[in-house]
Amino acid sequence: MLKYTALILTALGLAAAIWLIGHTGFAQVADGVARIGILGFVVFMAWSGVCLTLLGAAWLAVAPGIDRTQLKIFAWARTTREGATDVLPFSQFGGLVIGARTAIAGGIRPALVYASLIADQTTELAGQLAFTVFGVAMLVAILASNGHGPDVLPMVLGGTGVLAAIMAGFAFAQRPVLKMAQGLAGRLLPGSIATMEALTGELDAIYRQRGRVILAFLLHLIAWVFAAFGAWVALTLMGFPLKVASVLALEALIFTLRTVAFAIPGGIGVQEAAYVLIGPIFGLSPSAALALSLVKRARDISIGIPAILAWQWGEWRSVRADAAGG
C-alpha cells in the first residue's frame, strides 16, 4: 500500500511540475537550463560533492570510536542515502535505510550505524531549523518593506512550525520509542532484544559526548548554508545574478517545504511550486526559478543514479559471496 501511495504521489507531483513548466513557458525554462553549460554543470556537481562530504563528516561526528580516516565510508553512505531519497520512488525513509546499509557494508558495526543515524538526523533537523529561521526573517523583512508578491507567509510559517514539530518529536521521542520497541522485540523476537539494547546503549553513549553532538549540529548548519550557496553559484553561471543573502533565504525556505513534504518522493512538484511562488519575492522570475529547479534535478539524477547502481552492485556481490561461502 505504501509503495503504491508513493508511486501515486510521484505521478501527481510530476504532473504538477510539468504543468508549471508549461504554464511558465517550456522555451523560456529550457533556455535558462541551457545557460549553465556543461562546464558550469560539472562545477555545480563538484560543489554538491563537497557538500556530501560535509554531511558525511557530520554523521561521523556522532559515531564515537570511529577513526577520522573512515570519513570516506560515511560520505559514501550519505551519497547513497541522498541518491535514494532523490531519485527512487519512495520517501526519505528508504534513503535512510540504504544509507545505513551502505555504512554497515563499509565495516561499521550495525548498532553504532543505526544509533548514529538517529543522532545525525536529529542534529540535521536542528541545523535546518536554525537556517529556516534566517529564511523566514528575510521573507518577513522583504514583505514588510514592499508588500508585494503572493501571500506565502502563512504557508512558510506553517511549514516552519511543522519542521519544528518534526524535530522536537524526533528528539524527544527517541528513547520512549526505543524502549517500546525493545519491549515488543522481547515478546515477538526474543533473539533481537540484545540488538535493541546495544542500539540504546550506543545512542546513550553518543548523547553523553555533547561536544560531538554540537559539532554535528554545526557541520550540518554549515552544510545547509553551503548547499544554498551552491544555488547562487548555479544561478550566476546561468546568468541570473542575485544577492547572496536573497538566494540563501530562498533556498532555506525551499529546503523547509521539501522536508515537510517528505511523504512525496524527491519533493517533486513541491519544489517547483515553491520556487514559482517564493522566487519572485526575492527577485527570481518564475522561468529562472524553474530552470534552477530543473538543474538541481539534473544534478540529483547525475549523482544519485550512479550512486544507487554502485550500491546495488555492492549488495549483489555481497549476496553472491555469502551464497558461495554457505
Image (spheres, rainbow, N blue to C red):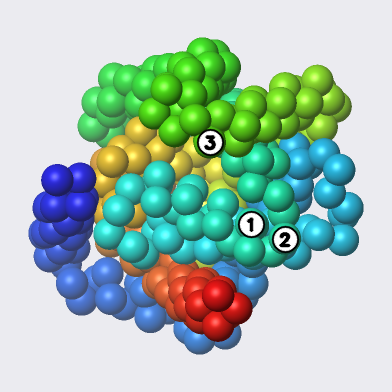
Sequence-wise, the earlier of marks 3 and 1 is 1
- Quadrant in which the N terminus appears: top left
Instruction: Give the residue displayed 55% in from the left and 83% down from the top.
Output: 324
Whether residues under marks 1 and 2 lie with C-beta atoms below 8 angstroms apart, the answer is yes
Q: Position of residue 295 (x, y in %)?
A: 41, 68
Look at label 1 and name its amino acid.
Ile
Question: Which residue in the structure is indicated by mark 3?
Answer: 191
Whether residues under marks 3 and 2 lie with C-beta atoms below 8 angstroms apart, the answer is no
Classify 117 as above or below 324. Answer: above
Per the model, the C-alpha gap separating discs 3 and 1 is: 20 Å
Q: Position of residue 89 (x, y in %)?
A: 27, 59
- Quadrant in which the C terminus appears: bottom right
Per the model, the C-alpha gap separating discs 1 and 2 is: 5 Å
Residue 301 is left or right of residue 109, and the answer is: left
Classify 143 as above or below 257. Answer: above
Look at label 3 and name its amino acid.
Gly
Instruction: State whether residue 165 appears in this view.
Output: yes
- Of residues 257 and 138, the one nearer the viewer is 257
Look at label 2 and name its amino acid.
Gly
Crowdedness near tag 2: few (<14), some (14–19) or many (≥20) residues, C-alpha within 10 Å: few
Which secondary structure, mark 3?
A: helix
- Of residues 178 and 210, the one nearer the viewer is 178
Instruction: State whether residue 220 appears in this view.
Output: no
Comparing marks 3 and 2, which lies closer to the viewer?
A: 3
How many numbered callouts?
3
Question: Which residue in the structure is indicated by mark 2?
Answer: 107
Crowdedness near tag 1: few (<14), some (14–19) or many (≥20) residues, C-alpha within 10 Å: some
Crowdedness near tag 3: few (<14), some (14–19) or many (≥20) residues, C-alpha within 10 Å: few
Question: Which residue in the structure is indicated by mark 1?
Answer: 104
Residue 304 - label: none
Which secondary structure, mark 2?
A: loop
Classify 18 as above or below 45. Answer: above
